[in-house]
Image: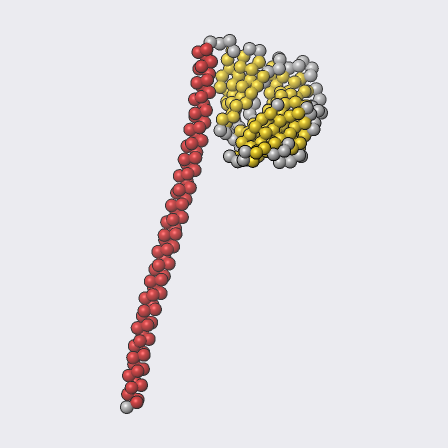
């Protein structure tokens, strides 16, 4: 299993597994560096994403815990050990808005039902709203996360039906629609159109926010320009006043000088 990420135009990272090891190779320009060993306790389910200009990854280790790490260090940043009576599987990592989001399936060891859970490793006191539909599945579901800008679409498939959810940048959840996978092509096209319209709306909102932020910045710059212009006018007035006072003083000084020269001339006679 391997994934490749472009961190910037000149740098890329190849993340891959080999047995129980997780390794990486960094591309600089057109050359790849030597392999770097990141972990030796890998069991399965490697998932990774770029967040805050760095590569983060999660996996299930040989102790059945889910670990979060960063490509820049070997330490564990977040650990999710299994709970008594439960079994964690299929973890996935993604970036939504300004937060890292960990999703995983939790299997009940008693009745072998599943539910989809999530964690915010850097906001431990906050939880996402519950998904609108029942999260309990009688058999193991398949799920995928598709990130689009700051939003994400979550697809959950189980027992011949699919559910779609939109995760907004503020981490709110909206159910798009539930469909039977055997539905007509027309229904599937309608679902795709609905997803597309929601994503376009999210893009429009992001654009409007960016426009407003730009307007606020321009208004602030205009206010600063106006303040500087007033300061320049004040300084120019001070300079004119000082210049006028200097000229007046020079006139007085010249008058005194002329009077002094006249008196000096009379005293010589």
Q: Residue at x 45, y 31 (%)?
A: 206
Instruction: Single out the residue that lies furthest toward the front.
Output: 31
Q: Residue at x 38, y 55 (%)?
A: 231
Q: Residue at x 34, y 69 (%)?
A: 246
Q: Residue at x 62, y 15 (%)?
A: 140
Residue 128: image location, x then y, percent: 56, 26
Locate the N terminus by quadrant. Answer: top right
Locate the C terminus by quadrant. Answer: bottom left
Q: Is residue 61 visible?
A: no
Q: Quadrant of residue 6?
A: top right
Q: Which color scheme is applied?
A: secondary structure
Residue 85: image location, x then y, percent: 70, 19
Q: Nearer the viewer, residue 223 or 52?
A: 52
The reply, left or right, for residue 116 in relation to residue 242 is right
Q: Nearer the viewer, residue 90 or 119?
A: 90
Q: Quadrant of residue 144?
A: top right
The reply, left or right, for residue 251 in relation to residue 45 is left
Q: Is residue 1 visible?
A: yes
How many numbered marks appear? 0
Residue 247: image location, x then y, percent: 32, 69
Relative to 29, is 160 above or below?
above
Q: Nearer the viewer, residue 102 or 146?
A: 146
Q: Quadrant of residue 215?
A: top left
């Amino acid at each position: 299993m391997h994934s490749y990420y472009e961190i910037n135009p000149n740098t890329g990272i190849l993340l891959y597994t080999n047995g129980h090891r997780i390794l990486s190779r960094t591309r600089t320009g057109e050359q790849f560096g030597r392999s770097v060993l990141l972990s030796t306790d890998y069991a399965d389910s490697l998932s990774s994403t770029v967040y805050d200009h760095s590569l983060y990854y999660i996996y299930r280790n040989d102790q059945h815990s889910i670990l979060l790490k960063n490509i820049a260090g070997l330490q564990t940043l977040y650990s999710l050990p299994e709970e008594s009576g439960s079994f964690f599987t299929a973890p996935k990592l993604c970036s939504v808005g300004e937060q890292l989001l960990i999703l995983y399936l939790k299997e009940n060891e008693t009745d072998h039902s599943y539910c989809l859970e999530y964690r915010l490793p850097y906001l431990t006191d906050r939880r996402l709203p519950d998904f609108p539909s029942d999260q309990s599945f009688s058999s193991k579901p398949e799920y995928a996360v598709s990130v689009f800008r700051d939003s994400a679409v979550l697809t959950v498939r189980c027992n011949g039906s699919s559910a779609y959810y939109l995760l907004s940048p503020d981490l709110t959840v909206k159910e798009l629609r539930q469909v039977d996978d055997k539905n007509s092509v027309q229904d599937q096209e309608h679902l795709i159109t609905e997803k597309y319209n929601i994503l376009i709306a999210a893009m429009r909102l992001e654009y409007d926010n960016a426009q407003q932020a730009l307007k606020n910045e321009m208004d602030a710059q205009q206010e600063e320009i106006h303040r500087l212009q007033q300061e320049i006018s004040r300084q120019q007035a001070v300079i004119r006043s000082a210049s006028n006072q200097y000229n007046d003083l020079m006139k007085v000084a010249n008058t005194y000088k002329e009077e002094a020269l006249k008196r000096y001339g009379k005293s010589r006679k």
